[in-house]
Amino acid sequence: MATNPTLQTPNPTLAEQVLHAIQAAIVNGDLAPGSKLKEPDLARAYGTSRGPLREAIRQLEARGLVQLTPHSGARVTNLSVTQLLDIYELREALEGMACRLAAARLTDPEIGELRRLLEQHGAAVEDQNGREYFRQEGDLDFHYRIARASGNEVIARVLCEDLYHLMRMYRYKFSLVPDRPVAALKEHWRIMDALAEGDGELAELLMRRHIRTVRQNIQRSADELAGDSTASNNHEGAA
Amino acid sequence: MATNPTLQTPNPTLAEQVLHAIQAAIVNGDLAPGSKLKEPDLARAYGTSRGPLREAIRQLEARGLVQLTPHSGARVTNLSVTQLLDIYELREALEGMACRLAAARLTDPEIGELRRLLEQHGAAVEDQNGREYFRQEGDLDFHYRIARASGNEVIARVLCEDLYHLMRMYRYKFSLVPDRPVAALKEHWRIMDALAEGDGELAELLMRRHIRTVRQNIQRSADELAGDSTASNNHEGAA
DNA sequence: TCGTCACTGATTGTCGACAATAATTGCCTT
DNA sequence: AAGGCAATTATTGTCGACAATCAGTGACGA
């Protein structure tokens, strides 16, 4: 509810609306990775013709959410573990940089807002009964806002419009290690403190370490799945 | 000629072809920054209907080459100096990382190929009569290949498909300082040596410094233009 | 003379239909 | 029965036409 993309323009285009709709469907898992996007079906589902739909698909392809092969159609992107790890490798550099820049620019109101976000985040971590979804979203929201606060539009664009959607696709693919949410929140608070003090160097270091930790957890989790008998190859593993 | 995008698939889609055509037109300056993309005109120019054309425009928007506002149309992106500097800031982090990764992965044949590229590059620097175009392209080609050689597909994608086209738009916007090409080539060779020795740490440092230098030159050049009486504000400055 | 408003022209957004290509089914051969 | 081949079906790619919206023009009134 905080960010409803269809409301940002008073008279949004159909292509725009269906873009956000499909994007949400992919992120939520309603359209499974690897599944085919059949234009007639989607057009009927969203009540449009194929024209705007095809425009939306082209944009999804540019954002990396679908892959399309000529004369064959579009499939929902199915990231390999390697590619997912690549994304985290990239995030380490990008978000580290964003932190350094943000530390020098954050205003007091923005800092207060970030603090409030982390407090909500903490509440979601406390009651652990089934609110994992909101915890994950809150986690990403923190990163999202720092990217925006960096003041570098290009970095913010790459992170927020290209990478975050991909990561949200894989929220549940890898199980968290026990107590990881608590540790992650603590790391966020440390980053927060560094940002509030304007210590860009420290904020960058902490953010890089934070992301590296998550990356290593994913790698471990993937290795375990690979050793598991049920794991076929590289895709589709968690439960 | 080295990379002809229309040949990569045997039966390319019209939308694909017109995408590359418009992209080339924008990068070459045939479509000036800020100019409007009128669909009827472009469709006539490229001999297609508006359907594939609109799909191409949506992809160009995702790549940052055009900006489109609903019910009004698409305009060629007109980067502010700030945004251009932001791109270089991002490149410093991204390409530094790409260098570090590439140093650990480059094979001997790839190293040889890179060397040959730099030798051609050196020849273009030698005869300075009007071959500036090829020098610039060679420069970018070096960066392009390192990004690919990093082995991180995501980084390569961001650099090669999003950022490089934008930078090629602004090749001539800012005049080079005297002897800069010679110095830049020398920096490339140093990076090359570090890569060949597998010294990722050094390669990253050298690449970051290299890009930072270019960025500072742009900033200086922009400041001079700002002091100039002809410069209105932030856009359209060079001659 | 200037500002406002309706009108005209052009441009964008959307749709349904047709052609070209790929995927699938069933059949035939070995 | 298994594999390959051909006809059919479904899906993608492309087009031209219509509706909705925007931009520019000119007239009208203060």
Image (cartoon, coloured by chain):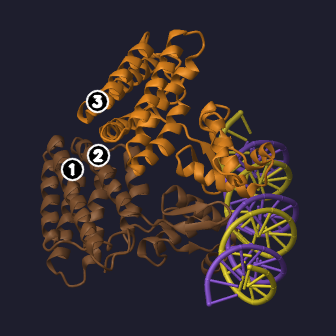
Chain colours: A brown, B orange, C yellow, D purple
Label 2 to label 3: alpha-carbon separation:
23 Å
Question: Mark 1 belongs to which amino acid?
Answer: Arg
Give the residue displayed 47% in from the left and 40% down from the top.
B163
Quadrant that contains the N terminus of chain A: bottom left
Chain of the residue under the numbered disc 1 shown in the image: A
- SS at badge 3: loop
Residue with the mark numbered 1: A208
* Residue occupied by mark 2: A93
**Labels 1 and 3 in the same subunit:** no
Which residue in the structure is indicated by mark 3? B197
Q: Position of residue B225 (x, y in %)?
A: 46, 19
Tell me if label 1 and label 2 are in contact, CB under 8 Å. yes
Q: How would you rate the neighbour count of disc 1 (Cα within 10 Å): few for under 14, some for 14-19, many for 20 or more?
A: many
Of marks 1 and 2, which one's residue comes earlier in the chain? 2
CA distance separating discs 1 and 3: 27 Å
Spot occupied by residue B183 in the image (x, y as percentages of width and height): 38, 15
- Type of the residue with mark 2: Ala
Q: Position of residue A13 (x, y in %)?
A: 61, 64
- Location of residue A59 with respect to B93 vertically, above or below: below
- For residue A45, side relative to residue D25 (left or right): left
Nearest to the eye among marks 2 and 3: give it.
3
- Secondary element under disc 2, as helix, strand or loop, is helix
User: Both on one chain, marks 1 and 2?
Assistant: yes
User: Residue placed at 37% from the left, 21% from the top?
Assistant: B189
Give me the residue at 22% from left, 61% from top: A214
Q: Are marks 1 and 3 in contact (CB under 8 Å)?
A: no
Amino acid, disc 3: Glu
